C-alpha cells in the first residue's frame, strides 16, 4: 500500500522533516519517490516564450518586467507555425511537455489569447502535453484552454504569503491562489511551485511548501526554481543558494506531495551532473531542457538537449512519454481515500 496523501502538514512537522539529517532526508524522499513513480523515468519539458518582455508587473526577479533595465526587449508574439516547429524539434529530442509562456499580468479576452488557444491546439495535435503560463486566469478562460486540449497550467506561488509582498507589489498572493482555484475547476492539471534564493528565510520556503500541499488535489507538478540572477533586477546581487538547500527543498517537496512531479527548474545549469543526480535521487523527476541554451529569455540559461541527453544516458534514465503519469495526485488521492475508508461491515 502506498503512503496516503496528506494536506494537513503543520509548519513544525515540515520544519522537522526539512531539518532532519541530510542523508536521512534524502533516503526517505527517495523511498517515497519509488513508491509513486518509476525512478528511471525523467519528464523532459521545453519552455517556449510566445510573447516576450514588456510585462507591467514588478516581480523583483524577472528579466521581462518593464520596470527594470535587463536588456530583454519586447518582442512580437510568435506565430503558430513557429511554435509548432519548435515543439516538433523538441518532441524529436525526447521532450514530452511544452510550456507556452507569455509575459502578461493576466489573460485578456482578445486576439492574442485566441492565438495562444490556437497554438495549444497545434502543439497538442503533435501528441505532446501542453502547459501554459500566461499570468492570472478567470474560470471561463481556463475552460476555453481546457476545450483546446490544454494539459496543464503553470502559476507559481513563488514564496510564502508574507515574503511574496516584499518581491511583488502589483498583485497579491490571494490573486495567485484564485487563479489556481480557477484551473482546479477544470480538468487542466495544476503546475505550481516557487523560487529559492530571493533573500527569503528558510521558514518562507517551508510555508510555501505548506501552501502547496494544502491544494486539493496536490498540484500535479511542483517546480522548484533556483533564482537565476538577472542583471538590472533588484535580485541581481543575491548570494548563491547552497546546493544542500536545493536538495533539502526538493526532498521535502517530494515527501509532502508524493504523487506530484517535482521539477528542478531555473538555475539547474549551475549544478554539476553529480549535484543534479542527488536532486533526482531526492525526488526531482522533471527538468526543462532547451535547444537554445536558455529558458524564456537569454537572461535565464538552461542546459541544452544534447547535454541533457548525455546526463540521462550516464544516469541510466529515460525520457518519460507524454500523458504517462498514472499516479498523478487525482488518481493517488482517490486510491488513498479508498484505502483509508472504513471497511464495510457485514450486515447479518
Ligand atoms: N507571466 C507569467 C506569470 O508570472 O505567471 C509567466 C512568466 S514566468 C515563466 C513564471 C515563473 O518563472 C515565475 O513565477 C517564477 O517562478 C519563474 N521565474 C521567472 N524568472 C525567474 C528567475 N530569474 N529565476 C528563477 N525563476 C524565475
Ligand atoms: Fe511578468 Fe510573469 Fe515576469 Fe512577473 S514573472 S514580471 S508576471 S512575466
Image (spheres, helix red, strand yellow):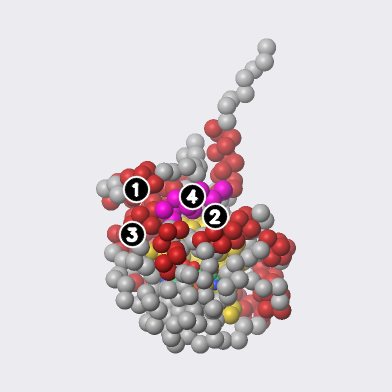
Residue carrying label 1: 15
Identify the secondary structure beneath mark 3. loop
The one of 215 and 310 positioned closer to us in this rendering:
215
Q: Give the SS element for disc 4.
A: helix
Determine whether, in the image, residue 223 is placed left or right of residue 120: left
Question: Which residue is tagged 2?
Answer: 220
Disc 1 beta carbon < 8 A from ligand 1? no
Q: Are marks 2 and 1 in contact (CB under 8 Å)?
A: no
Q: Quadrant of residue 196?
A: bottom left
On residue 213, which mark appears?
Answer: 4
Q: Quadrant of residue 174?
A: bottom right
Are the residues tagged 3 and 2 within 8 Å (C-beta)? no
Q: Residues within 10 Å of mark 3 (few under 14, many from 20)?
A: some
The mark that comes first in sequence, 2 or 4, is 4
Calculate the distance from the C-alpha at mark 2 to the C-alpha at mark 1: 23 Å
Name the mark nearer the viewer: 3 or 1.
3
Q: Which residues are magenta?
A: 207-218
Decide: few, some or many residues near mark 1? Use Cα within 10 Å; few <14, some 14-19, many ≥20.
some
The reply to whether discs 3 and 1 touch (Cβ–Cβ < 8 Å) is no
Please state the horizontal and vertical placement of residue 23, each as a whole percent of the image.
28, 49
Mark 3 to mark 2 CA distance (whole Å): 26 Å
Which residue matches tag 3? 201
- Main SS, magenta residues: helix
Amino acid at each position: 500500500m502506498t503512503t496516503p496523501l496528506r494536506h494537513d502538514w503543520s509548519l513544525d512537522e515540515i520544519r522537522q522533516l526539512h531539518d532532519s539529517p541530510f542523508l536521512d532526508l534524502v533516503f526517505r524522499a527517495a523511498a517515497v519517490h519509488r513508491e509513486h513513480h518509476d525512478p528511471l523515468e525523467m519528464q523532459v519539458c521545453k519552455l517556449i516564450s510566445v510573447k516576450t518582455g514588456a510585462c507591467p508587473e514588478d516581480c523583483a526577479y524577472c528579466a521581462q518586467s518593464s520596470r527594470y533595465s535587463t536588456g530583454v526587449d519586447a518582442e512580437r508574439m510568435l506565430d503558430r507555425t513557429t511554435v509548432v516547429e519548435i515543439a516538433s524539434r523538441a518532441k524529436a529530442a525526447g521532450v514530452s511537455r511544452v510550456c507556452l509562456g507569455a509575459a502578461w499580468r493576466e489573460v485578456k479576452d482578445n486576439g492574442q489569447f485566441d492565438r495562444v488557444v490556437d497554438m495549444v491546439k497545434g502543439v497538442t495535435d503533435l501528441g505532446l502535453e501542453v502547459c501554459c503560463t500566461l499570468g492570472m486566469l478567470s474560470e471561463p478562460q481556463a475552460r476555453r484552454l481546457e476545450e483546446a486540449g490544454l494539459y496543464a497550467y503553470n502559476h507559481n506561488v513563488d514564496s510564502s504569503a508574507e515574503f511574496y509582498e516584499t518581491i511583488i507589489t502589483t498583485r497579491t498572493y490571494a490573486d495567485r491562489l484564485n487563479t489556481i482555484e480557477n484551473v482546479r475547476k477544470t480538468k487542466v492539471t495544476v503546475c505550481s511551485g516557487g523560487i529559492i534564493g530571493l533573500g527569503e528565510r528558510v521558514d518562507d520556503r517551508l510555508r510555501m511548501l505548506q501552501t502547496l500541499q494544502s491544494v486539493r488535489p496536490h498540484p500535479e507538478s511542483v517546480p522548484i526554481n533556483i533564482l537565476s540572477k538577472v542583471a538590472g533586477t533588484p535580485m541581481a546581487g543575491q548570494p548563491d543558494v547552497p546546493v544542500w538547500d536545493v536538495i533539502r527543498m526538493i526532498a521535502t517537496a517530494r515527501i509532502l506531495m508524493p504523487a506530484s512531479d517535482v521539477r528542478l527548474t531555473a538555475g539547474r545549469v549551475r549544478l554539476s551532473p553529480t549535484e543534479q543526480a542527488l536532486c533526482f535521487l531526492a525526488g526531482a523527476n522533471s527538468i526543462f531542457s532547451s535547444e537554445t541554451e536558455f529558458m524564456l529569455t537569454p537572461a535565464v540559461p538552461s542546459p541544452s538537449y544534447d547535454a541533457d541527453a548525455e546526463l540521462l544516458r550516464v544516469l541510466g534514465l529515460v525520457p518519460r512519454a507524454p500523458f504517462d503519469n498514472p499516479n498523478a495526485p487525482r488518481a493517488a488521492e482517490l486510491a488513498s481515500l479508498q484505502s483509508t475508508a472504513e471497511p464495510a461491515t457485514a450486515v447479518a
